[in-house]
């Protein structure tokens, strides 16, 4: 097996061990034992998990039907799914950086960086857009959250204006991004927004599963979406444990839901995320290892078998 492959394999196994270690800690920190004694509709919960998984598939289409038509759908799903799964068990949004390792081997460092940064900005824009629309429909009036939302909105608009000015007046920067200044970027944005809408639907079904009324759950899901995603911009604990619960309590508190109930809701919604992303991430990671190292393992196994056969033959001759 080539030294480069051995090095990648060692790094892969190390990452696997780290992820397993942090997964155990993250799941312990969730403290979901009490949920199993609550009156929860687990059928709706399962549907919510399925929609959450499907949203990751749709997010992958931002590559294959958007800014990178050369990429196949499985690779795109691996980049998205493994990155999100890693974020659920590793701190500081480390999964965003790990995605770079799962791009096709022929991609240059610059291309990988562009394909990470541009969709990340698209995610931010989609979250802000949906959150701004969610606030008036949700009806909650928490001043701290509203202030944070408006600050982020103005910063986003200012950054967009500055970027457009730089693109116009700096030819070198314009040529650097020229590959992505086309209609495919608009298509990418469509798939990104659609994926976040599906995540919003997953949250809504999670609230319905907690036996909240169907129509009331729509307002509540909008409040939870805005609060948790804005707070989740803070890179901190694995899976935003603690921050997600705080955001859910904050969002639902603005609608008159008591903290005890809101905490139980937050645990269920967080459990849905883990139930969707961890199995998906593990499956995609194993599949990626099979694709990258399967031939190397097979070749190594054949070489070792040939060596064993030669050794047995020599032993019999002696």
Image (tube, helix red, strand yellow):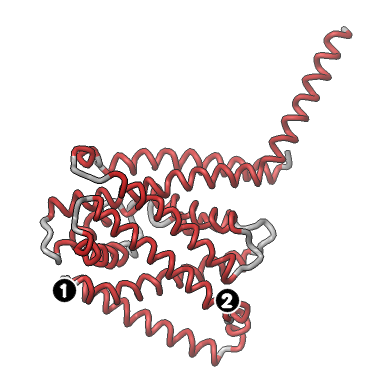
Res 203 quadrant in image: bottom left
Quick one: SS at disc 2? helix
> Looking at the image, is mark 2 or mark 1 earlier in the sequence?
1
Q: Which residue is mark 1?
A: 143
Between 26 and 219, the one nearer to me in the picture: 219
Mark identifier at residue 184: 2
Res 222 quadrant in image: bottom left
Q: Position of residue 210 (x, y in %)?
A: 22, 50
Q: Position of residue 153 (x, y in %)?
A: 32, 79
Q: Position of residue 202 (x, y in %)?
A: 34, 57
Side of 133 where 146 appears, left or right: left
Which quadrant of the rendered structure holds the C terminus?
A: top right
Which quadrant of the rendered structure holds the N terminus?
A: top right
Side of 209 where 295 appears, left or right: right
Above or below, 55 relative to 301: below
Residue found at the far bottom of this picture: 169
x 58%, y 83%: residue = 173
């Amino acid at each position: 097996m080539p030294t480069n492959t051995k090095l990648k394999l060692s790094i892969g196994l190390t990452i696997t061990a780290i992820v397993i270690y942090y997964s155990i800690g993250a799941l312990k920190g969730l403290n979901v034992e009490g949920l199993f004694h609550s009156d929860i509709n687990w059928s709706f919960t399962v549907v919510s998990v399925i929609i959450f998984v499907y949203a990751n598939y749709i997010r992958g289409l931002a590559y294959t039907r958007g800014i990178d038509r050369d990429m196949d759908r499985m690779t795109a799903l691996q980049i998205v799914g493994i990155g999100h799964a890693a974020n659920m068990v590793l701190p500081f949004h480390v999964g965003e950086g790990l995605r770079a390792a799962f791009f096709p081997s022929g991609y240059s460092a610059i291309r990988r960086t562009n394909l990470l940064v541009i969709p990340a900005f698209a995610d931010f824009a989609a979250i802000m857009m949906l959150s701004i629309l969610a606030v008036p429909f949700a009806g909650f009036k928490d001043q701290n959250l509203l202030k944070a939302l408006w600050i982020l909105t103005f910063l986003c608009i200012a950054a967009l204006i500055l970027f457009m000015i730089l693109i116009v007046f700096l030819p070198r920067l314009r040529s650097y991004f020229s590959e992505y200044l086309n209609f495919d970027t608009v298509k990418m944005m469509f798939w990104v927004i659609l994926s976040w809408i599906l995540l919003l639907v997953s949250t809504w079904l999670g609230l319905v599963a907690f036996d909240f009324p169907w129509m009331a759950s729509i307002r509540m899901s909008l409040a939870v979406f805005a609060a948790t995603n804005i707070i989740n911009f803070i890179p901190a604990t694995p899976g935003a444990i603690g921050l997600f619960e705080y955001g859910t309590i904050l969002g639902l508190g603005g609608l008159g839901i008591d903290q005890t109930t809101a905490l139980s809701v937050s645990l269920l919604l967080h459990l849905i995320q883990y139930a969707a992303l961890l199995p998906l991430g593990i499956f995609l990671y194993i599949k990626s290892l099979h694709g990258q190292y399967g031939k190397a393992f097979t070749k190594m196994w054949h070489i070792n078998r040939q060596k064993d056969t030669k050794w047995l033959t020599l032993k019999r001759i002696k």
